[in-house]
Image: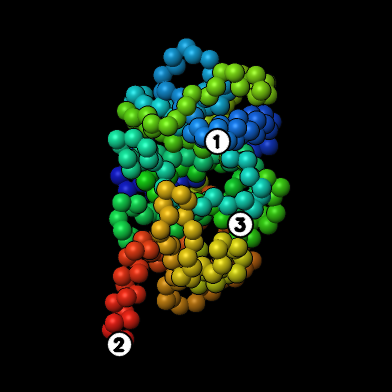
Amino acid sequence: GGKKKDMHPVVTLSTTPEDSTVYTALREQCQAAYKVRVERQKKGSSPTFWVPSRDTGNEECTLDKWARLVYKEMIGEKEGGAEWWVLDLDGDGCVKWHWDGDWESLALGRTPPVATVTYLTTGGCCTSVVKANQMKETDRSESFWLSPPVVSRRLVFDGADLHGSFPSVGFPPHASCRVTFLVNCWVGHRPHTTWSFPPAAIPSLPVFPFPLSLLPTYPTILPTRSIHPTALPFIQRHTKFGGEWARHERHFANAERGRILSIGMKKTEDGGEDSRPENIERTLKKAGLIEVPATVVIASVKTLLKKRKRLRKLRG
């Protein structure tokens, strides 16, 4: 396992069938753990938990053990650990653009080698990933990726990538909730603000009624499909992600305030069959991951203001 150079996002599939009741039990675990997370946030504590790569014999919940299994699959036997948390959002609940990292220690700006999102429900917001470096004042990418939430699937991407989620594009249009299990794999480093899942809260989690050997593993990589650039107007019309896609200004999460993301469609010939709405929807439903060719620019507000000032001077 482990991170590869220039790692592109992939979606992996579990050996455990999509309709298995194992996922129902794990979803219930996550929904209960999310309540614990919310309570910690109210008290000002970090909303992420930590489990070391090696079992120390301390009391652990089922999700601790699953996070360690994710680490082993992604990284192998290297010393480190898994930073994990859960989200239990409304079907249209969005996650603002952000970079994962250690923001409150001497390792400021350090990012995890591998990040994962495991879907425990189907439908709702797609996860979007953009290859953009948070240390650059301005960065550019020639595509972005969409991962439609489907129970039993796992999105894996470089922990340095920009990511977030926004309402789904014709896939499925409605979902009552969106439950995800998120694990960042850290090698030789523990983020400063992570906590062990509190043992006192373990009794509040539902009993996991299966042996731990039945925790899902993810050996199969699903194919990535590409949506033709001329499909972008369709995507624009079918999202509520901050208004227009082209040149829109979208608020980032707290750590990245002051950034602007713009997505522009390339000048291309008609995409033909690939651009028809019914074919786009079919692609979204079948694909593990969708690559959307487009010009994506991420810049700081400071940089853009300088550019606008120069343009005004040139225009006289």
**Residue assigned mark 2:** 316
Q: What's the mark number on residue 157?
A: none
Nearest to N terminus: mark 2 or mark 3: 3
Observer-nearest of 214 and 61: 61
Q: CA distance from mark 1 to mark 3?
A: 28 Å
Q: Which mark is residue 168?
A: 3
- Residue 163, image x and y in percent? 46, 51
Residue 12 visible in the shown view: no
Nearer the observer: mark 1 or 3; the answer is 1
Q: Amino acid at mark 1?
A: Gln
Percent coordinates x, y for residue 186 in the rendering:
37, 32
Q: How far is disc 2 from disc 3 in space, using C-alphas?
A: 44 Å
User: Mark 2: which amino acid?
Assistant: Gly
Q: Image point 58% across, 40% down: which residue?
A: 87
Quadrant for the N terminus in the image: top left
Q: Residue at x 50, y 44 (%)?
A: 155
Residue 41 is labelled as: 1
